[in-house]
Image (cartoon, rainbow, N blue to C red):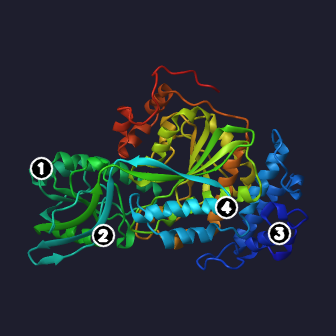
Amino acid sequence: MDSGSHRAFVFPGLESVAGSSLAVLEGLRGCSPPHPPWSPCLSTSSSRRLLSSFLSLSLLGSPALAAEPSKPAAKTSPETSRAEAARLTAAFLGDTPLLSDLQSLVDEVGGRATGSPANLRSVDWALARFREAGVEARKEAFQMPGLWLERSASASVRGAGVDYSPRIAAMPFSTATPTGGMTAPLLDAGKGGEKDFQALGQKARGAFLLVEQAELKDVDGLFREYAESAEIEQRAFAAGAAGVVYMGSRPNNLLYRHNVSVGLRNTRPMMVMERDGALRAQRLLRTGKTLTLTAQLDIQSGPAYESYNVIGEIRGSTRPDEVVVVGAHLDSWDLGTGALDNGANVVALIDVARQMKRLGIKPARTLRFALWNGEEQGMYGSAGYVQAHEAELDKHVMASSFDIGCGRINGFFTGGRPELPPLVDRALEPVKGLGPFTQVDAPIVGTDNFDFMLHGVPNLVANQEPALYGPNYHARSDELDKCDPQQLRLNTAIMGALAYGFAQMDAKLPRQSRAQVEELVRTTDLGQQMKSFNMWDEWTSGKRGRKGSTVAAPQSR
């Protein structure tokens, strides 16, 4: 689409859609300075066509766009809601602080593991961004069950005529080794299956077990890796292994964090070895070499401690007691700087709140923009919120989580609530030009919708195209250049439409009872997912999840 076509969208009143016609045009043609040098902004022809299509869909049928924001009425009319949704989503086409915020978070604050000084800096950073935008913000304390941070990790592989030092990363919740390191036989455990352990027999006791992993290609492979690792570790612990050494599943010898399946209950050194170094050890073992591994893991660990979520809030104008939660976790692992996981969605969430305040949009329901901590260790920040706000949960209309990088949002996981997909479709109507969107009505574990789901609150997880997410997940390579800035802007528009749509619509699904959540566990793979993520015992013990009768209440339709 040429510049002449752009002028078709510039008409009186466009200033109230995106701040100014110039801002929108610059968003479509390229970047207006100053702008992060890593971002090509919105200058490619394909992006111009996509954005022009989106803008036209947003503006059609919205004559109220030319007007300045009006004072809130007792109840916003459907026409005004559509106009406000269009104004909000169009705002992200112009220059906003979205991209400079991402660069600041990942390059200045950096990797921000919960419990680290960088994580505390990220809390202050987020509070400042909300408050600078005029959004009321606070930090809410919650308890982390224990501290785990890696200080350093190294290893040496030795045998007759063999001596080399592959790079390793400690797995979260690995124990430290004694001063000077820990040496044990290194054995080939194949892919860690039952037959592999049967073949090892008693030799596994007291040995480091090298487990082969396929190279990770996509998010499906990532979830498969989590599920398989939980089973492998159960076998290794039962066999009395000294520890497990996973062959790195990432290309180019990338190191990454992958949580030990039993979390803080772990009692062994656990690590990931760079792929080429692990393949070398595997070849040597399979040609008959006897090898030992000396691992030196310096771990900072400690008891329960206090961490903080950051909550920005825009109070509802007509139904302030009803709450819509838009969430993204603020913490990351520390090898990279957490651009994909989850800095991109953090800055998108902040920008949605910022643009709503700038445009004077007053949602009917209260919108809470939640930046969670402790997600990587077990979704503890969102669990803390659910516990602290238990008395309000009946009034929580929806809780969403955005946590799969910068790939295009192509729909939402709707948690096994068949009434929910049509409401999502309705909320996304203003951005249908960025679709198609397909809702997947299945529960999902692994991010901050989890405790809302176990407490019966309707919950959503953004489903995103993999893009570069899988191979860079928790890896040293999770850096700024892996995020597509054009797609991030479009995702932010989708996030804004979803948040505003649920804040305005009259529909409200009932909160599920404990019995209804138990039925969801029984009739889906939710239970198996919880076991893979070390959540099953906390659910069955009642530590997590809604309390109450196990007699199912009637389901509202």
Residue beneath disc 2: 274
In the image, what residue type sits under mark 3? Ser
Label whose residue precedes the other's in the sequence (4 or 3):
3
Residue 449 screen position, x and y as percent: 51, 44
Q: Looking at the picture, which amino acid does disc 1 mark?
A: Gly
Residue shown at 39% from the left, 41% from the top: 530
131 with respect to 479 (left or right): right
Q: CA distance from mark 4 to mark 3?
A: 21 Å
Nearer the N terminus, badge 4 or badge 1?
A: 4
Residue 415 visible? The answer is yes
Q: Position of residue 48 (x, y in %)?
A: 74, 70
400 and 138: which one is in front? 138
Q: Nearer the viewer, mark 4 or mark 2?
A: 4
Residue 187, percent from left and from top: 16, 61
Q: In the displayed structure, does residue 198 sit left or right of residue 366?
A: left
Q: Is residue 38 above or below residue 501?
A: below
Q: Check whether the beta carbons of the residues at disc 3 and disc 1 lie within 8 A of each other.
A: no
Dot in front, 4 or 1: 4
Q: Secondary structure at mark 4?
A: loop
> What residue did someone put label 3 on?
21
Q: In terms of secondary structure, where does tag 2 sit?
A: loop
Q: Which residue is mark 4?
A: 133
Compute the Cα span from label 4 to label 1: 62 Å
Relative height, residue 324 to residue 155 (above, below): above
Residue labelled with disc 1: 201
Q: Secondary structure at mark 3?
A: helix
Tell me where residue 301 sits by quadrant: bottom left
Mark 3 or mark 2, which has the lower sequence index?
3
